[in-house]
Amino acid sequence: MPRSGAYDEIWGASGSREGRPEFKHLADWIRDTDTVEFDRRQAAAEAAFRQLGITFAVYGQEEAGERIIPFDIVPRVFTAPEWEQLSTGLVQRVEAINAFLDDLYGAQRILKDGVVPAELVLANAQFRPLLMGARPPHGIYAHICGIDLVRTGPTDFFVLEDNARTPSGVSYMLENREAMLRLCPELFQTYDVLPVDTYPDRLRETLESVSPRSDHPVCVLLTPGHFNSAFYEHSFLADSMGIELVEAADLEVDDDIVWMRTIDGRVRVDVIYRRIDDDYLDPLFFRPDSMLGVPGLLAAYLAGNVTLVNAPGTGIADDKAIYSYMPDIVRYYSGGEAKLPNVETYRCREPQALQYTLDNLADLVVKLVDGSGGYGMLVGPTASSAEIEAFRAALIAEPHRYIAQPTLALSTVPTLVKDGIAPRHVDFRPFCLTGADGVSIVPGGLTRVALKEGSLVVNSSQGGGTKDSLILAPSRQTIDPDGMHQTLGKMSQTMGRGMKPMQSMGRR
Amino acid sequence: MRLSILHRTTYTYSQPQTRLMQLLRMTPSSHIGQHVVDWHIDIDRDARLRYRRDGFGNETAMLYVDGPVDTITLTVAGEILTEDTAGIVQAANEPLPPLVYLRATPLTELDEGLASFARDLAPDASPLDRAHALNRGIGERMRFDTGTMDVERAAATAFAAGHGVCQDMAHVFIAGARVLGLPARYVSGHLFRRDGASDQPAAHAWAEAYVDGIGWIGFDPANAICPDDAYVRVAVGLDYREAAPVSGARTGGGMETLDVGVRVALSQIQSQG
């Protein structure tokens, strides 16, 4: 069972399967569609993903190898007012993240004013002293942010985590939509869904807008290589943006300028969308044993001759130790309260918080400050007593490495499971782009769903799946209810009759 | 003192290299007690240098050389006026707050042996006296020994072995000082030897700790003293990696042989005057 009291985003809080009024037709569609039909469509989507090679490697599981992230055929839907609420909050948060980074690598006003403890930033390995004073074009550091959100009620959204390094998953947003348009076209005729396929163009515009040279900037995507778990996404994005996908060996730095080797000679590179972690970017400046990096790349960056997206050193903004100060950081730079609140967070480095955490381990979620991917995490209510005791010992030994949060009753979305359709907990990662003209958010994102009954851990490495996330256009959310009813009951046979004009499909 | 410094580094390759790139941190800056009168970097072949100050405040140069290269010599030379400031560093270019230097790095990682050694030296003394005790204590526990020269040796490893070069001792000091809550950093530079040994096989390295109310203070555990007017600071960093005189990358395979010669002497100008 989902956690008691969990809010279902389609069915509402009541637990009935009638659906929220605005999603009545979707609830009908879920109820009236044969599970066998859902199974068929889901299998078709997963077969397509497998064929495309949208796979990921699960670290630490030898036998797993490459597998696809399970796809769920039942979409999640946000109404226009819900999306409006989210996107204004996201813009504010992402602007604050960039202002914070610009400040930390510059004047450090926020530390001098005591809003964030200086030691927490300065002694943190994610803060890169080497880059002090190096300001990228327009003062933008985190051009691409993936903000992880959770929901507990109709208007209750919380930021669970900021991802300001090299957030991944956007290819799922795009491929899931492709699959849904193909397999469930009736939904897109019923609902006026905003398109997500503008993302590659917007990303390319963002990259070009931060180029150090204005004339025909050359942008490339730098990947660690095909053995990386997100390689599919790297090649997919490069392909859909129409830019070169390169590995370190394709680039060289000369005279503080980055060049790409091509069969027609070398080409000067202006912007690098890099999907390599800071540590491995440049063996001359960072880890000397890196085989993935480009020697001298940081010299070109420091000289202002190339823009790195995201900039090196952004990890300090999404560090879990910093997270609990984000409301203060947002207030400091925006002058207003954070429109998207944080999840209440106990900093175990503080003695009182540690004591509270130790006293309430069975009810809390405890996370490693420097962990990710759902590793190093305790979910008290579902943990065994042995797991709780192991965390207790770890907390006492190194309290500064942990934070704790209440176990939230995460919202659920109806999901296809073995026995039919049942509620499963979800989170949401929208992708926010920041370029010279400000923040732009494609109306969509990655919905991750915990497929295991009652589980709150949505990470793909822990058995999570994904869903398409539909954002409805403002006003005119549904078309002629009668015509729609026909379609919903009979599926593809009645498709196209009395439906929306075709140009709305052109949004794909 | 007016010191004349000549630092020559020759790389020889077993087969010609197609490209060379080096990040040089070989140029000292002026501050109280250290005035750079004259300084230049010479390369014995066609090369391009791009100068820039890094985030630590170091004066750096990126060196780019096109091949084929089978040998290259970097000659760094200049004259520095020094005064004894009892190890205290003032008015240096400091872009970073001292707290940056509290974090552990791969080369300054601790183990329990090193941590308790640092904690147990003069536990009730002032931070300044504890830093002095650490500086002396390292010399008593570790033997200076050039036999194990490994630039990637961690502090705890060197400390457990009980011997090392100046770089190892600097790393041990840095790791120990950070345990005591003192920001500490690595310094690479040059040392004028009063015993007349002006020709040296390598540059020198020591450490600095930050003590509230005083500021950055140099400690040279290899000599169990604080730097005086015989010392010339060149670069600082969290550990060796960020302050090393040269970090290089090359394309062309084969083996590299390195020959370093450092000469630190009283300037002729001063001797004549």
Image (cartoon, rainbow, N blue to C red):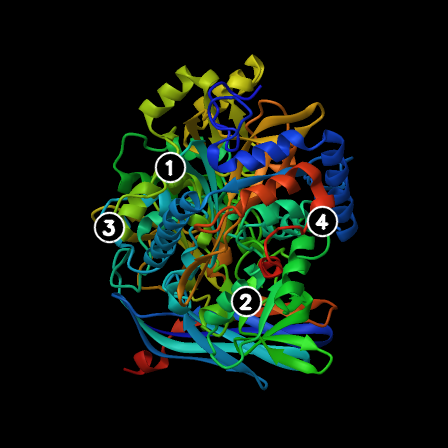
Say whether mark 2 and mark 1 are on the same chain.
yes
Say whether mark 3 and mark 1 are on the same chain.
yes
Which element is circle 4 on? loop
Instruction: Classify mark 1: residues with Cα within 10 Å, few (<14), some (14-19) or many (20+).
Output: some
Residue under pointer 1:
A342
What amino acid is labelled 4 in the image? Ile
Chain at numbered mark 4: A
What amino acid is labelled 2 in the image? Arg
Q: Is residue A117 above or below residue A309?
A: above
Chain at numbered mark 3: A
Say whether mark 4 and mark 1 are on the same chain.
yes
Chain at numbered mark 1: A
Residue under pointer 2:
A204
Residue at the image position 36 percent from the left and 19 percent from the top: A355
Which element is circle 2 on? helix
Residue under pointer 3:
A335
Chain at numbered mark 2: A
Task: Report, in whole angstroms, how far the alpha carbon at label 4 lies from the one at label 2.
Answer: 22 Å
What amino acid is labelled 1 in the image? Asn
The location of residue A314, given as percent across then percent down, is 45, 53
Task: Report, in whole angstroms, how far the alpha carbon at label 3 lies from the one at label 2.
Answer: 31 Å
Task: Report, in whole angstroms, how far the alpha carbon at label 3 lies from the one at label 4.
Answer: 42 Å
Please name whichever residue, A395 or A505, is drawn nearer the observer in this view of the structure: A505
Q: Quadrant of the N terminus of chain A?
A: top right
Q: Earlier in the sequence, mark 1 or mark 2?
A: 2
Task: Report, in whole angstroms, how far the alpha carbon at label 1 lies from the one at label 4.
Answer: 32 Å
Q: Earlier in the sequence, mark 1 or mark 4?
A: 4
Residue under pointer 4:
A54
Task: Report, in whole angstroms, how far the alpha carbon at label 1 lies from the one at label 2.
Answer: 31 Å
What amino acid is labelled 3 in the image? Gly
